[in-house]
Amino acid sequence: MVKKGKFKLFSFLLENYLIYYKSINKNNKLIAFSILESDNFLRIIKPLNEFLLNKYLFYYSIQLNIPQKRKTIIILSFIGENRSNIDKFFNLIKEQINNIDCSVSFLKNRKLKRHFLHVLSNNIDGGANSMKQPNLLVLKYGESLKFIQTHQINCDNLKNQMISLHSLVKALKNLNQKGYMIFNIRTNNHQKIVTNAYFLGIKYDVDSNVIDIDKEINQLYNCELFKKSNLNISNIYRILWRVNVSDNFYAINNNADIFFSLSHFNFQDISKFNTQFDKILQLNKLSYHRLKPNLFFIEEKILFLILEDYNLKYIKKLLKNFFSRYFIFILILNQKEYRKLIESNEIGLLDNLKILSFKDFVMLDFLELKKENLLKNA
């Protein structure tokens, strides 16, 4: 991990939005962590990857709680030789992320510490002893025991929705599993974005009838998706720091295909989606009027039409009546129907028109809707 620095795992400085570790050797290396919570983390993956490529971030990790809660937390990691540079990079990232999505919350002080330590224990300040059992790490806090099993995840089988991440999360829940799914994301030596993914299974007693979760998951998806990983006690920091648990990394795309199935937008029910869209406009403080259940007039210059299927007649009527006066966005929720429209050549390339798939929509920066040149070079 940090080969040139040694750190005391439970000795750190907490200050506002950051947790700092200082190396205990002559290296004088600093490593720091911040945590943010997001309802829709998909929109901020692209800028986070850009921060990685620009060396503002050391790595970041996406943590999904099992059973899943609504908000996803992301751990940001910084490395450097002085706090001023780390503070500068953090403040820049915080400002840009908040500009992209004002619903993102950066944790601070006691809340930051609680979420950072929670993966091991809420009572870590009281001290802990660790033991190694076959395939398990055991943490002892007084009379309490916590058993941790790590499972590597083969991300090749998650790419391009071959296996839906939403389906995997649901399967773990149905198998009564509790713990955390971690995606540790960084750049490799070739400046490509890669991830190392794993599931931390958490138990508080060892049941003799416990199921073989690797076998159950692999049989369900008919491939080797899960594989037990034996984590040494000396590497327990990998759990706390949400860093990689093996050297197996998988290339991922900047458009976050692996995570799209976790979008909180309901693309299967257009009425529910329209209600969610209404709330998103409010959250981003955009002025708008809802002309019809699926047609919104935004910032006095944009018509935003939401359709479930490819409806060429409706689209042509809208363009005929309003194209000369307004920017027009058309969102097609059904991916197959979206492709039909794109491939039909019935609608030419127009400067004031942008047709969106649901993936385009998830990545849309709503604050861009306030800008005059929002459709240029789209």
Image: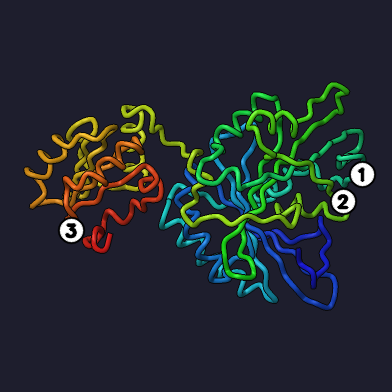
Residue 356 in the figure: left or right of residue 76: left
Evaluate if marks 3 and 1 touch, with contact meaning CB atoms under 8 Å apart.
no
Residue kind at label 3, given as amino acid type: Asp
Instruction: Please say if 67 is above or below 331.
Output: above
Residue 317 in the figure: left or right of residue 145: left
User: Which numbered disc flags the more N-terminal residue, 2 or 1?
Assistant: 1
Image quadrant holding the C terminus, namely: bottom left
- Of all residues, the one furthest to the bottom in this rendering is 26
Evaluate if marks 2 and 1 touch, with contact meaning CB atoms under 8 Å apart.
yes
- Which residue is pictured at 61% across the width and 74% down the height? 85
Instruction: Please say if 254 is above or below 312.
Output: below
**Residue count near mark 3 (Cα–Cα under 10 Å), binned few <14, some 14–19, many ≥20:** few
Distance, label 2 to label 1, CA atoms, is 7 Å
Distance, label 3 to label 1, CA atoms, is 63 Å
* Residue 130 quadrant: top right
The label nearer to you, 3 versus 1, is 3
Instruction: Kindly tell me whether residue 369 is visible in this rendering.
Output: yes
Label 3 SS: loop
Q: Mark 1 points at which residue?
A: 132
Label 1 SS: strand
User: Which numbered disc flags the more N-terminal residue, 3 or 1?
Assistant: 1
Q: Position of residue 195 (x, y in %)?
A: 62, 55
- Which residue is pictured at 36% across the width and 53% down the height? 365
Q: Name the residue under label 2.
A: 232
Instruction: Kindly tell me whether residue 16 is visible in this rendering.
Output: no
Label 2 SS: loop
Depth check: give the residue in front, 363 or 254: 254
- Which residue is pictured at 49% across the width and 42% down the height? 39
Q: Name the residue under label 3.
A: 351
Q: Where is residue 138 in the image (x, y as percent from the top left)?
A: 88, 40
